[in-house]
Each structure stands twice: as C-alpha cells, then as structure tokens.
Image (cartoon, rainbow, N blue to C red):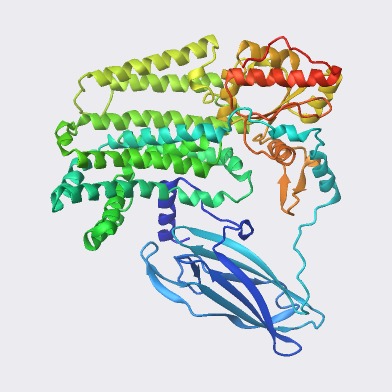
Amino acid sequence: MDELRLKNFLICVLILLGLPIRLAAQFDVDPVNWSQQFEQSNDSTYTLILQAEIELEWHLYSQYTAEGGALPTEFTFINDGSDYKRIGPVKESETHTEYSDIFEVDETFFKGKAIFSQEIRLLNPSVNQVRVEVFYQVCKEVCISAERSFTFMLDGSEAPEMLVEIDAASRAKGEALSISLAKPERLYSGVAGEEPEKQSLWLIFGLGFIGGFIALLTPCVFPMIPLTVSFFTKRSDNKSGGVAAALFYGFCIVLIYVLLSLPFHLFDTVDSQILNTIATNIWLNLFFFLVFVFFAFSFFGYYDITLPASWANKVDAASGKIGGGIGIFFMALTLAIVSFSCTGPILGGLLGSTALAEGEVATNLSVGMTGFGLALALPFALFALFPSWLNKLPSSGQWMETVKVVLGFLELGLAFKFLSNADLVGNWGILKREVFLGIWILLALGLAAYLLGFFGKKGGIKPRLTFWRLGGVILSLIFAGYLSYGLFYKAPLKWVSGFPPPDFYSLAESNSDCPLGLDCFKDFEKGLQHAQQVQKPILLDFTGWACVNCRRMEETVWSDPDVFSLLNEDFVLISLYVDDRTSLPEAEQFQFQYESGQTKQIETVGDKWATFQNINFKAVSQPFYVQLSPDLEVLSPAIQNSDVATYRNWLASGLQTYEAGKSNTVFSPGIKLEP
C-alpha cells in the first residue's frame, strides 16, 4: 500500500474506529449480481463470459484501474496451463474513467453493467469443467471487497455445489454439540425480561445526546454557534427564510453523523456470532485501549487530532459555489471536519460504549449517532428561532479547556475498561479487580486535583474555584470514596456494576471462580451429570468475560438475598463463557458444519459454547439464561436482562414446574410468586 492510501486508511480509522470492510459475496449484501455463460467455437476452443449487473451509483473497478485507488478486479483460472490454456487476456466491456479526489488518481470502472470474456483452448480433451475465481471491489460511499467462484460446465450439465467436506471425527464432535430438548416450545412461549438491545437503545441514544452536548462546550464547536446563526439570519431576505435555513443546517448535521454509522450495517447479514467475536477480540480491545489513551492525551493538550486542512477547504469552497440546500449541507460537513479534533474522541467514546453494550452494534451506533447529531444541531436551530437568546450565551474562555481536560480523564477511564476486557478474555491476571479499582480511584483523585488547580499547563494562571469546579471536585471525591469503599471492604459497587472485573477475579485467593462465590460448572456435560446425581434443575448461564450486562446481572440481581438463596440451594449452576479464548486440547478441536454448509473452526472453549448456544437455543446474545431439568426438559421461557423481582419470580416458576413434573402435584416453593 503506498503512502497516500495508507494515509487515507488511517484517516478512515480515526473517523469510524471501525475495521476495514471485507465481506464475502455469499452474505447477500453484494451490490453486484453475476451471471455466466460460455460459447463454443470448435471442439477445443471456448469463450468464457461473466456478466456483472451493478446496482445504481455503485462502481465496479477495471482490471486496469490506476494503482493507488480502488482495488482492481482480478481473475484466477484454476488449472490454467495443465487442463487448458488461455488465449490472450481477459477482455472487458466499455469502462469509464474519472479523477478521484480521495485517492488523487484516475480510476477506471464500470457503471450499470460489466462483461468479461476469456478465450481458452483445452489441452486435455476429457476436461469438462473450468473453475474461475474473481476478486473485486465495488464502491459507493463505502467500498466492499468480495470474492466469487464460478464453475463452467463445458458439457452443459449443472455445476456441482461447492460444499466443504469435513472429516468423520469433526462430524461426530459437531453432532455431540446438539442436545435433544424436551418441550423446546417453552423457550420462547412468553416474554421473560426485555432483550438487552431493547433495554439499551434509549440508554445509547441518551449517551449519544450527552456526548453531543459535551461536544458543544468544546473550543472547536462553541464559538461557531453565534457566528453560524448570525450568518443565516443576516444573509436571508426575511426572518423566516433565515430560520428555515438554520433548521435545515441542523438537520444536515444530524444526517451527517447518522451516515457515518451506515457502513456498520453491512455486517447485519454476516454470521450472527461475528459481532460478539469482534467485541470480545483481545487485539481489538487492546487497539481500543491505545486509541482511547491517544484521544485522552489530545484532550490534555499535548497535540491536536485534525483531519487534512485540504478537506475542509474543498468542502467549504463547494458550499460557497453551490448554494441552496446542497450548499448548506456542505456547510454542515465543513463544521464536522473542522471540529473533529474535539468531536473525534467523543465519537470514539460513543463507539466504545456501543461496543460494550449488548445487542446489534450497527443499530446501537446509528441510535447513538442520532443522539449525538441531534444535541449538536439543536442550538443552531433554537438560537435561530430565538436570536435574543444569543445575548445570554456565555462567552468563550478557559472553561472550555477545562471541559476538554475533564473529558480526557473520562477517556482514560474508558480506555482501562477495554484493557480489562482483553485481560479477562486472555486470562492474563494483570488487571485484577483491586488493580482496576485502584487506577480508577487515582484518575478520580487526579481529576479533583486538576479542578482545584494543582496542575495544568506550564505558566498558566491558576484558575478561580468556581461553583462548577467545586461541584466537579466534590463529585470526583465522592466517586473516589465510593470506589475505595468497594476496594477495601469488598462491597458490591452497583453504581458501576459491569465495568470493574468480577469480584472473583481478585488478587486475594478465592475458593471459587464463580460469581458471588457460588458453586458452578463451566462444562455442560459435567454440570449435567451432577444435576442428574443430585436431582436438581439446571440454571444454564450463557455469559462472557467481557460482557457488561452479565456482570450487572450478577452484581445487582443475583446478589439479592432471595435470588442468591435460590441459586445456591435449589439449582445446579452451569456458566458457559462464550468468549473464553482458552485453547481446547488439540484432540478436542474440530471443524463444525452448519446446515447451510458453512463451516467454523472450533479451537477455543468460547468457540465451543458460542456454537452450542446458537444451534440449541437459536440465540447469540449474553446474558442468556435457560432453566432445564436433569432430563433436559425446558422449564420456562428463556430470560435475558431483568430486574430482581422478575428474575426471582422466574426462578421460582421454573422450580414449580420442575417439582410438579416430578410428583405430579403442585409444588409451592419457599418463596411465593409475586404479581
């Protein structure tokens, strides 16, 4: 990759904090629809033809597009030179060439339709099929790279399906993962608690809105409010026209930030476990840790993160030339670019909170981006409607730098959450609960010291202790004291439940590595055998080391005395960690094949239990709780997130069903169901 493409790649990473998008064509998100045929010239000469129907506004790139731009289309002819010989290069239909402002090269591409043809001569008369593999990239606002395989049957027969053959041992191990559930219809016969994504959407929107509001208070955005509003109200011939322009400007701001989330929706049709795998990936969590530390020090004033000035200049020039609604859109885009040094780290925090939340990452991110853009856009609309409010707007000053530094401390705190995720999943033992809490306590005390003026920029004037600074100091000290109470007295920290490592991940020796010191099994077969021996129902707990909602349920719901008593005395707890990266013994590793023919390598403990959850319970989210009898009868609907009362009733209901099935009489557990 040359320097220019590397630069643009890094810029995209900073904007979206995402991964390069590369999707296989089999997932039906490909904007290119392929068809194939062949023509026979004589007994040994054939012309292979591939035709691509390209969706509107998408570009498929030529084999000969300039280096440094989008990737060219490439063809690989299997067994070329042994079964047959190619005559000349692959021919293309008509192409278009345009200069790309992004890559600064002339790109050659197809619009609407592309036809590729290759003439071949058979070297072996018995050959009746030719396989061709195509790699290509198609771009619109985003670029998708994909691969396709085509088989040309020269005798006119139907091409065989390309199914991956797995060995008998892998097939047997895969079949052993499937269990026969009795009364599986009970799993989803009622709604037992809300799904995490439904619970968290409003929370994600709120976090996005708060992030946008905080971004307003930074030096990159705040001074722009009166200037922009005055521009619209004074430029227009009448007040209503200026207000309409300002309102549309606000709408464009929201639209731009929502558009930034759209590439993530391309993951929606991919393997359902991919997002969980990404969120719990050790190296990705380490990447987030480093990025958030980088963002934090930019807020501390050591450097600025800015996009190339040429971007802002070009967009600003476009807004002046075009005018009208499109010109206003480019003005909003200019704001997004020039304010990136302040909004970028906050958007990174939003993506981080989205990655930590349960549910669909793409949906969460779109909702969060909507909240962020709305908070950023509201002042421009409100001050246009009520211009007299501008007189009450506080003037810019040192307080905006204070906001940035406070955000820097918050970014550092979030950074260590990602490092903790990597540590938990990798089981490194670096950030034990006490170490993590100690770091957060130091950050809280450091923030209080900064607000009191103990340190800051060299040569700077010591700030005056205002009401807001004093309030920040008090809140920081209260938070530090709260964490210290949990650290030294081993008390549950319900305010921050889910963020610190679990209580059993501790420096102190513990008799149990299960939540709250409960007895639990981390292998389904062993737990099932024990349940059959003691004749108790099973609580199957699909969880994860990096699962925030799992820790929150354990620390706020399972810790309730009644719930804890039920779990401890009446159930056999089996906790299966779907993100456990511990390698299975080599003899236990295998290749699993889904009914669709897709295969997945089962190499770690987490791979095994994530697949086990998916194929038996048709679920991939965590936490996910199922009650089973020792004979694998489903006792109640599956449950995910819930409050104490709901979870307590759910456990008691499952016990009642289990005992009724044993004795054929109605069993009344020690704890009665509440309405």
Q: Can residue 503 be seen in this view?
A: no
**Residue at 69 percent of width and 38 percent of height:** 610
Q: Is residue 580 left or right of residue 453?
A: right
Name the residue furthest bottom: 42
Q: Can residue 126 be seen in this view?
A: yes
Residue 427 is drawn in which quadrant?
Answer: top right
**Residue at 64 percent of width and 16 percent of height:** 516
Q: Where is residue 232 in the image (x, y as percent from the top left)?
A: 18, 49
| Of residues 165 and 322, the one drawn nearer to the viewer in this rendering | 322
Compared to residue 255, the image places residue 424 above or below, namely: above
| Of residues 238 and 384, the one drawn nearer to the viewer in this rendering | 238
Q: In this view, does 371 lie to the left or right of 524?
A: left
Q: Where is residue 205 in the image (x, y as percent from the top left)?
A: 43, 36
| Of residues 176 and 586, the one drawn nearer to the viewer in this rendering | 176
Q: In this view, does 233 lie to the left or right of 281?
A: left
Quadrant containing the C terminus is: top right
